[in-house]
Image (tube, rainbow, N blue to C red):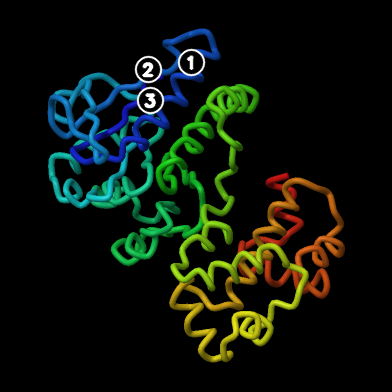
Amino acid sequence: MRIGILVFPGVQLLDVAGPADVFVEAARQLGDLRAYQVQVIGTEAGALRSGSGPRLQVDATVASHRGRLDTLLVAGAPDVASITGRADVQRWLQRQAKVVRRIGSVCSGAFVLAAAGLLQGRRVATHWNSVDRLAAENPGARVEPDAIYVKDGPLYTSAGVTAGMDLALAMVEEDHGRELALRVARELVMFLKRPGGQSQFSAHLAAQTAEKSGIRALQDHVLANLRGDLSVPALAARAGMSERNFARVFKDEAGMTPAEFVEVARIDEARRRLEASDLPLKRLADAVGYANADALRRAFSRRVGVAPRDYRRQFT
């Protein structure tokens, strides 16, 4: 299978190298290096400098490329806007979308597909920091704000950077089965082959965004004491602040209210336990700080979009 990855000056290097390594390792595991052949296709010829400095030598350009691809991925970049307006790139993508088996994007590469009109009416994913802009600029697309990757017919889109490897692994599994995908994941020392619907943004990651050490320490306290009293009055008292000032400072630093952070932290832990254990829902609710199973069900469905039982069935 020929895999094309579209690149351009300033491209995010890992958006290219990550998926490429997954496909090449899959071919190696199959004992047939022709099983996946990766081509780097540039918006222009020569060696293109990536956003981090190293250059990528392209195999062909959108003008010179010949032959049929099985799968085409568009890499992303912080400055992806530099090519979204290029008519030649849009026309080439539109032509390819009609003949390839799969077309998709990594990270902000979704904006390039959007410019070519390929997201209309589709479910899509992108980097968590870009979902609002992608949704606002493309009202015809259904942007899923928290997914690792999304498959909608022949369109495959992923979240930021390393999520491109998850997307490539999913494609390998689709082509050759789960056993090969897990062998590739182990060989590349990937922590986990993550299902696409899992959250790309956890409470632990959110806790790293606060700049004030006091708020970070309080977030760490929440993460370590999910069964405790995590009400605003209790947290404000621990922070030595009035409730009103605490709520304001916390939201300014964390980008969410204290109650929202507590819920995200509890649901994040519930999600992990649903994946890794068969703990009854009543006991799981108690373990993550909910008064009963019904309270957990309501919060989980609100945050994740499915009931805990359905989530466990899909991701265990």
Label 1: few (<14), some or many (≥20) within 10 Å? Answer: many
Instruction: Please identify the quarter of the rendering in which residue 61 is found.
Output: top left
Kindly identify which numbered label has been placed on residue 27: 1
State how far apart marks 3 and 1 are (Cα): 15 Å
Which type of secondary structure does the marked residue at label 3 adopt? loop
168 sits to left or right of 110:
right
Q: Nearer the viewer, residue 109 or 220?
A: 220
Kindly identify which numbered label has been placed on residue 305: none
Where residue 265 appears, as percent x and y from the top left, is: 64, 64
Nearer mark to the viewer, of 2 and 3:
2
Instruction: Please identify the quarter of the rendering in which residue 11 is found.
Output: top left
Where residue 153 appears, as percent x and y from the top left, is: 46, 42
296 versus 18 height, above or below = below
State how far apart marks 2 and 3 are (Cα): 10 Å
Counting labels gives: 3
Residue type at mark 1 is Ala
Ranked by sequence position, the earlier of labels 2 and 1 is 1
Ranked by sequence position, the earlier of labels 2 and 3 is 2
Q: Which of 130 and 149 is in front in this view?
A: 130
Kindly identify which numbered label has been placed on residue 37: 2
**Which residue is labeled 3 in the image?**
70
74 versus 175 height, above or below = below
Which type of secondary structure does the marked residue at label 1 adopt? helix
